Amino acid sequence: MKNIAILGNGVVGSGTARVLLSKAEKIKAETGEDINLKYVFVRHDYEGCEYRDLFEYDYDTIKNDKEIDVVAEVMGGVHPAYEYVKDALMRGKSVVTSNKQLIAECGYELMNIAKEKNVNLLFEGAVAGAVPVIHGIRNCLKANDVKRVYGIINGTTNYILSKMISDGQSYADAIKKAQELGYAEADPSRDVDGIDSCRKLCILADIVYGNHIMPQTVNTIGIRDIEKTDTDILSQNKKAIKLLGYAAKAENGKTVVCTEPFVVGDDSVLFATNDAFNAVAVDTDNADTIVFYGRGAGSFPTASAVVNDIVECINAENTIYPAWGAERNDLLESYENFVFKHYVRAVISVAKVKELFADAVILSEGKECAFLTSEMSENSLSEKLEGISVKAKYKTI
Ligand code: HSE
């Protein structure tokens, strides 16, 4: 028999408890073990919860229980999650977590402790909910160099943008609904300001490029400033704005990372990724582009990934993943030097656009002009637009 403790009973914690309890037979078939959910660590009461008999209010009881085999940390935030996860690993227990902030900030240290103690620290649920992007990248692309990895990795903002653009919902209504559906962070500014996407992007980039990237070092812009004028112009031109995490290998071998709204065309899978769905594209040398797509937020989708990680911990004979390398800021390239095509809306005539940008594609004209540039760095773009009143500017993919 294997004993599990879940730390947290919020959206993901309650989903994890319910999936574990309802899938006991399936998990036994997968692992050969009876699964005993022994504790759900809670910090306040959840009246009416059907498994309240499993609630434990004192963390020390779980900490000192030698029978616990796997700890599922689904509390979110760094403290006290960091202390609990570290303690569990030090005591030789495998840990699974959906905590993107914890892994993005402390993953390097914690994975090394796991490795030292010969236990696992798995975190599939931390990026893109149910979508097996971490397993996919780590296990299935070993024969490839990854040119870039980019995608929609925040369900809440994608839901808000979809509802505002397709259904004409207000920002306030869309965010409220995203909260009701259990997509949004406890503090939804983490979603709309791009912070959640940034954390997930860092985890993907750590895996793909091999060194820990601290979220604070990544240029991060959210969705608050997106204007209807631009979403309208773009939809008339079969394009959309999506909040993306983006990491790529620059020509000098360094890594470029940024999180911001990008313009995507209808030839991209990302264009059709709506509501709380996530999609991560990986451009590789041998396999071309691989896309991972599915539900990126919500109770059961995230629990699906967490419970799968529990099963893997039980089945693993050795540690599954070695830690990635330490933080190396000298290996990061500034996104401002990296070339993209850009979408620009500015107070400028078509003639002037054509004079400044020989290959520009005009999307709308009038008192303001919206256009796409050819590939150029943000620095060159800013130089060309000096003295011009720019209303909106987005990278395109
Ligand atoms: N707030 C997150 C999102 C939850 O909307 O994607 C899943 O990580």
Image (spheres, helix red, strand yellow):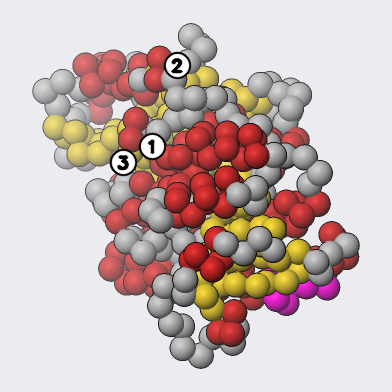
Rendered position, 139 above or below 129: above
In the rendered image, the residue lying farthest to the top is: 252
* Residue ID at (40%, 33%): 214
Q: CA distance from mark 3 to mark 2?
A: 22 Å
Q: Quick one: SS at disc 3?
A: loop
The three-letter code of the residue at mark 1 reads Pro
The magenta stretch is 20-26
**Which quadrant would the N terminus be assigned to in this image?**
bottom right
Sequence order check, earlier mark of 1 and 2: 1
Residue 230 counted in the magenta span: no
The three-letter code of the residue at mark 3 reads Ile
The three-letter code of the residue at mark 2 reads Leu
Q: Give left or right: position of 383 versus 204.
A: left
Q: Quick one: SS at disc 1?
A: helix
| Residue closest to the eye, 83 or 304 | 83
Residue 95 screen position, x and y as percent: 61, 52
Q: Give left or right: position of 34 versus 191.
A: right
Q: Which mark is residue 331?
A: 2
Residue 304 screen position, x and y as percent: 66, 62
Sequence order check, earlier mark of 3 and 2: 3
Residue 365 screen position, x and y as percent: 26, 38
Q: Which mark is residue 215?
A: 1
Query: Residue beneath label 3, please?
Result: 221
Residue 25 counted in the magenta span: yes
Residue 306 screen position, x and y as percent: 63, 58
Marks 3 and 2 in Cβ contact (< 8 Å): no
* Residue ID at (21%, 16%): 383
